[in-house]
Every structure is written in structure tokens, then in C-alpha cells.
Image (tube, rainbow, N blue to C red):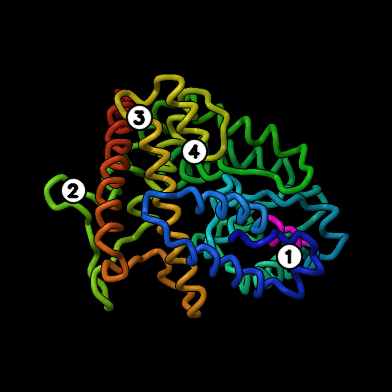
Amino acid sequence: MVPGCVTNAGDIRERGEELQRAWCEAVLGDDSPPDDTAGFRRWFEGYQVQRRAFVLAGWAETVPPDVRRHARLVALGSLARGEDLPQSDLDFALVTAADLRLPDAAPDIERFVRWMGPMGFSPCMGNVMGANPRWFGPAGAWTARIQSYVDFPDWANVRYLYMTVDALPLEDAPDWAPVAARVRDVIAGSAFMKWQMAHLGIRGTVGFGALRGVRWEAGGAGVAFHVKDRFLAPMVHALRLLSLHHGVDALGSVDRAASLGRLGALEDLQPEAIVRALWFGWRLRARHHAECWLRGQRDAVDLVPRSSLSRAWQEALHEHLRTAQALEHLVCRRFPKPRGSR
């Protein structure tokens, strides 16, 4: 059973933690085989609506109207793509009026971030949030910031450009469209930036080896697998890179894979295999997030212990990691280092 979505800010204020618990219990109540994701997809689609409602309710409840009038909330990362899970980080930017100063708005933004915690929103470990000057400011400041990244395209700055691609205003924000278009055009026209993502951001990150299979990591509680960094993130990054290169405007990873397949941009790799791998990875991660949240664990939520996975789940993980690795190899072949670059 998929819980009903609650969108009223007052109801969320009163019942936010209870709602989060219901969604976590619901995803764990699905005992279908690992590759039967029909029920999970229904849960996943509903949960995206609930997550965005959580964010908008928190923004309305914690930020005064005079600040909200001068700042527009832009979702980043998985929240923007519609791929949020029970303990996904809270990544967001703010496009503001010229007269709104960050020191004046920062206490309200920080209160918003704290308010989101009980509903499963962890503060972004990389500080990709509106209280960071890098992710705050009027359109002119955003334009100048992006140009500074373009003028000095080291890997750190290029990563900021890629982060800006996966963005979705949660409120009316007309100033954001030219910012987003500029970032997409810059990356699409730069062989160097595409090589950087393929070889500095994706290459070697999939947790799978042709001889040894799944690359489990040793930890204090036994071996585990990092389902985000070693599985989902390489696939999401590869699909975004290919979409920028081929002019695909879709934001969600499933839509990107389908569009790339129709364009013949995936070589011998079938888009259906990529989509199956994504759904499996999201389901595995969602279940572990929910288990951790229900027992009060708020760190290491992406490390899935091997002991928690049945043989069927381990075999499915092995199969889908092959697809992730094939996608990794595809982008590394497609985007070699340009001649003359250092």
C-alpha cells in the first residue's frame, strides 16, 4: 500500500515525522523479488510528490514572507530529478533579488535545513545548499559565478557546473532559465569538460570487477556495498553526460536513458537494461534508507551490509552492476582526452 500524499503545510508541520515513518514502513512492506519493481515504482512516484511537499512546507513554515518574496527555491540533485529516497541529502540553491543579502537570510535558511531533518532530509555533506554563497544570489551573480568556472575549468569548478544542470525551480523563478541554459551550452560545447566527467568523475567508480565481481568494502560491522557511490551515482552521471552531449533535455535518469536509446546513443547497451538497473538500485537504496531511519541511524545510510542481502538480492546486484560498468566503459570510450589539454 502506498501512503496518501499530504501537501498541506500545517498538516506536515503537525505530522511530518509520522508521515515519513509511514512511507518507510510502506517500502519495507514490499516483499516482491528483487527485480519485480512494479510495486516499488508506485511507491517511488508517490514519494517524490511527498518529498517536494515536505520541502515546500518547510520553506513556508520556517522562512518569513519578506525573505520568501525575494528568494526562489531551486531543487538540485535527486530532488530535482525526481529520484529522492528516505534519507537523501537536502541539496538546493536560491535565486534572489539583488537587495537580499545572505547574512540577513542565513538564519532563516539554516532554520529551514534543521526543520527538514525529522522527515529524512540530511544536510548536504558537500554544503550544496542555499546558505552557501556559492549557491545563493541574484541572476547577475549566478552568471558571473558560472563564467568564473568556465574561465578556470579545473575539476572542482567543472563539478559545480554539472551540479547546476540537475536543477528544478520549486517556485516560479524566471531568472533561472537563462542560467540553466548557459550551463548546458557550456558543457555541451566543451570536449574537455566532457572528458573530465567521464575520466575524473565516472571512470573506476562502479563497484564491480570482471574477475572478483561485487567490490564489497570492509567495515566495522562486516563487508558492505556503497549503493550510491559505487552503483547509482556513476549511472546518473553517465546518463547526464550523454544527455548533454546529444541535446537530450530530460531531467530524470529513466527518461534520459529512454531518450538516448531512441537516438541510438547507447551503442550495444540496451536502454531497458539501464532502466532495470536503476529501478533495482533505487529500490535497494530506499529499503536500506528506510531501515536505517526507522532505527534512528542517520549516518552511513548508503552502506548496505552483505549480510542483509539474500542470495537473490546479491545475484541481482551482481547482474545490474555489469550494466553500470558497461555504461561507465561507454562514456570513457566516447569522451577521450582532447589533444593539447593538460
Q: Earlier in the sequence, mark 1 or mark 4?
A: 1
Quarter of the image containing the N terminus? bottom right
Answer above or below: position of 211 versus 302: above
Q: In the depicted view, which residue is nearer to us: 304 or 58?
A: 304
Contact, mark 3 vs mark 2 (Cβ under 8 Å): no
- Residue 270: numbered disc: 3
- Given this view, does label 1 or label 4 mark the residue nearer the observer? 4
Residue with the mark numbered 4: 254
- Residue 209: numbered disc: 2
Badge 3 crowding class, 10 Å Cα cut-off, few under 14, some 14 to 19, many 20 or more, is: some
Residue stretch rendered in magenta on the structure: 52-59
Contact, mark 1 vs mark 4 (Cβ under 8 Å): no
- Residue 58: numbered disc: 1
Badge 1 crowding class, 10 Å Cα cut-off, few under 14, some 14 to 19, many 20 or more, is: many
Q: In the depicted view, which residue is nearer to us: 320 or 95?
A: 320
Q: CA distance from mark 3 to mark 2?
A: 21 Å
